[in-house]
Image (tube, helix red, strand yellow):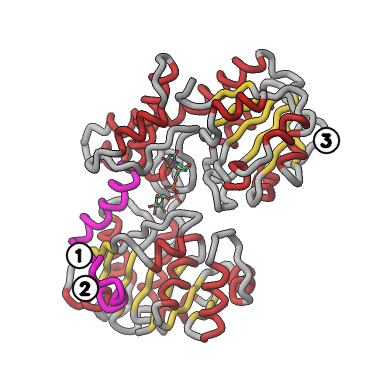
């Protein structure tokens, strides 16, 4: 079976390398020739633990190749995974133009039976559109099938998520397509859930929105904790001991960011509203999340009062640890708010600095990127924590305190134990704890 993976973003790269690791012959294709050239040399455009090794070993084995020739790749394949981007459009809905473009290209190159598998996160009913587009543009009466196989990769742990998944959702409408996909995922056959296509598409959106809702819920509880003597970490622990609730995704903080939750939540709200369903539960989830940065700024003001010309160190720019991705990262809004108040910023992140520099270039007076967290802390009036990188959990806090002008920490991820940090001599503010 020859597999094509179209699109070499996060999902496409992990899918191509992962399917090759399962032993399939895979071609990763992307129209961006320069990107393909670099990937084919084993150079990754993103930072993802374990991906470079997986890519290199499969390139070496010869079962993974890359091509910028989409037409040829489509013609040579039996199964095509569509992994192109579905960015957020202006009205909150997903922009499906890349999916449409690839569908037309598949139609034009349909030279035999193929299964077209959509893997990008898409609104329910997208497969029907792909099917209709291919049917409209194909030049012969050659048969094809469509399928939905949503991905559940988390950035930072995408490789193990792909190789050892909790579940593989396969949405199909024919037995032929079903048998092919079951064969592709033969080594995880105990974790397959086979559904119709609309169901598979909805499972993906429903899962992400549910997790986002869990985060907004715990953040709402954190707001309550701050007005009482309750401690959010203990509340989350107590809730999580109930197996019906579970202890994951109950970490209060700056809210959710990334390329998935914010976008998928808005897209599901739009889909529901377009279909006439009241989506207010999810709208509140989104609103609570949007408020997190405002509440965090209030905390910083509570500590420093006037922010103008205050030297503020920010540790953590990525939307979560173990990635260089800053898409929808809470740090972006925070930086904008602090600059707006006239603060002087010292920024540090182990992996995401270069990406942030594109958004906020270094500027001698207001924004400086530092080589270590200690350099960022040097002379600072306050230290803010925005991402729970392990490196920050392991910081030598005594050293940090001695370097700072004012030993104040505002911790947006509840990384430290309040009593311990205060014992060292810090004034410490965190989320939902006193
Ligand atoms: C998320 C899902 O977890 C994946 O299952 C899904 O495949 C992926 O989106 C996608 O749709 O492609 P990801 O965005 O990589 O994965 O990251 P998460 O680990 O889910 O974190 C998302 C955000 O929620 C981060 O900003 C994180 O800091 C925040 N978060 C997470 C919290 O604030 N509290 C928590 O308890 C957990």
- Label total for image: 3
Q: Is residue 330 above or below residue 294?
A: below
Corner quadrant of residue 231: top left
Q: Tags 1 and 2 in contact by the CB under 8 Å rule?
A: yes
Front-most of residues 62 and 71: 62
Ligand 1 within 8 Å, label 3 CB: no
- Which secondary structure, mark 1? strand
Q: Earlier in the sequence, mark 1 or mark 3?
A: 1
Report, in whole angstroms, how far the alpha carbon at label 2 lies from the one at label 3: 59 Å
Q: Is residue 376 above or below residue 67?
A: above
Q: Is residue 160 above or below residue 267?
A: below
Disc number lying in front (1 or 2): 1
Look at mark 2 in the image and give the residue it sits on. Answer: 178
Please say whether residue 267 is visible from this viewpoint: no
Residue 110, given in percent of the width and then of the height, sits at 35, 79
- Which secondary structure, mark 3? loop
> In the image, is residue 85 part of the stretch drawn in magenta?
no
Q: Earlier in the sequence, mark 2 or mark 3?
A: 2
Q: Main secondary structure of the magenta part?
A: helix
Look at mark 3 in the image and give the residue it sits on. Answer: 364
Report, in whole angstroms, how far the alpha carbon at label 1 lies from the one at label 2: 8 Å
Residue that appears at 77% across and 30% down: 402
Q: Tags 2 and 3 in contact by the CB under 8 Å rule?
A: no
- Which secondary structure, mark 2? helix
Ligand 1 within 8 Å, label 1 CB: no
Q: State which region is magenta.
A: 182-210
Question: Is the N terminus in the top left, top right, bottom left or bottom right quadrant?
Answer: bottom left
Q: Earlier in the sequence, mark 1 or mark 2?
A: 2
Report, in whole angstroms, how far the alpha carbon at label 1 lies from the one at label 3: 56 Å
Residue that appears at 54% across and 80% down: 59
Residue that appears at 33% across and 59% down: 150
Residue 129, given in percent of the width and then of the height, sits at 29, 59
């Amino acid at each position: 079976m020859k597999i094509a993976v179209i699109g070499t973003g996060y999902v496409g790269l992990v899918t191509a390398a992962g399917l090759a690791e399962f032993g399939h012959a895979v071609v990763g294709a992307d129209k961006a020739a320069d990107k393909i050239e670099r990937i084919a040399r084993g150079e990754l455009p993103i930072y993802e633990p374990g991906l470079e090794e997986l890519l290199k070993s499969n390139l070496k084995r010869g079962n993974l190749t890359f091509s910028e020739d989409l037409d040829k790749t489509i013609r040579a394949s039996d199964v095509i995974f569509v992994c192109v981007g579905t960015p957020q459009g202006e009205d909150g809905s997903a922009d499906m133009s890349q999916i449409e473009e690839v569908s037309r290209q598949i139609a034009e190159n349909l030279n035999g039976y193929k299964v077209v598998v959509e893997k990008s996160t898409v609104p329910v009913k997208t497969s029907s559109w792909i099917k209709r587009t291919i049917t409209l543009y194909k030049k012969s009466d050659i048969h094809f099938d469509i399928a939905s196989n949503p991905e559940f990769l988390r950035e930072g742990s995408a490789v193990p998520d792909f190789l050892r998944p909790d579940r593989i959702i396969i949405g199909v409408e024919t037995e032929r397509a079903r048998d092919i996909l079951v064969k592709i995922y033969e080594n995880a056959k105990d974790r397959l859930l086979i559904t119709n296509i609309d169901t598979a598409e909805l499972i993906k959106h429903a899962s992400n929105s549910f997790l986002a809702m869990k985060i907004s819920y715990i953040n709402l509880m954190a707001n309550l904790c701050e007005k009482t003597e309750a401690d959010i970490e203990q509340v989350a622990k107590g809730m999580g001991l109930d197996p019906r609730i579970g202890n994951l995704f109950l970490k209060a903080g700056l809210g959710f960011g990334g390329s998935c939750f914010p976008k998928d939540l808005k897209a599901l709200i739009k889909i529901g509203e377009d279909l006439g369903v009241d989506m207010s539960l999810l709208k509140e989830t989104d609103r609570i999340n949007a408020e997190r940065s405002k509440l965090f700024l209030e905390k910083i003001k509570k500590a420093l009062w006037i922010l103008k010309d205050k030297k503020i160190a920010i540790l953590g720019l990525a939307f979560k640890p173990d990635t260089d991705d800053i898409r929808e990262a809470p740090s972006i809004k925070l930086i904008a708010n602090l600059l707006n108040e006239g603060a002087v910023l010292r920024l540090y992140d182990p992996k995401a600095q270069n990406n942030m520099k594109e958004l906020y270039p270094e500027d001698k007076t207001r924004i400086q990127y530092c080589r270590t967290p200690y350099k960022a802390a040097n002379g600072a009036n306050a230290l803010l924590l925005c991402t729970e990188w392990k490196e920050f959990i392991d910081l030598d806090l005594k050293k940090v305190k001695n370097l700072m002008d004012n030993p104040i920490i505002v911790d947006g991820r509840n990384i430290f134990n309040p009593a311990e940090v205060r014992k060292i001599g810090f004034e410490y503010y965190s989320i939902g704890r006193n």
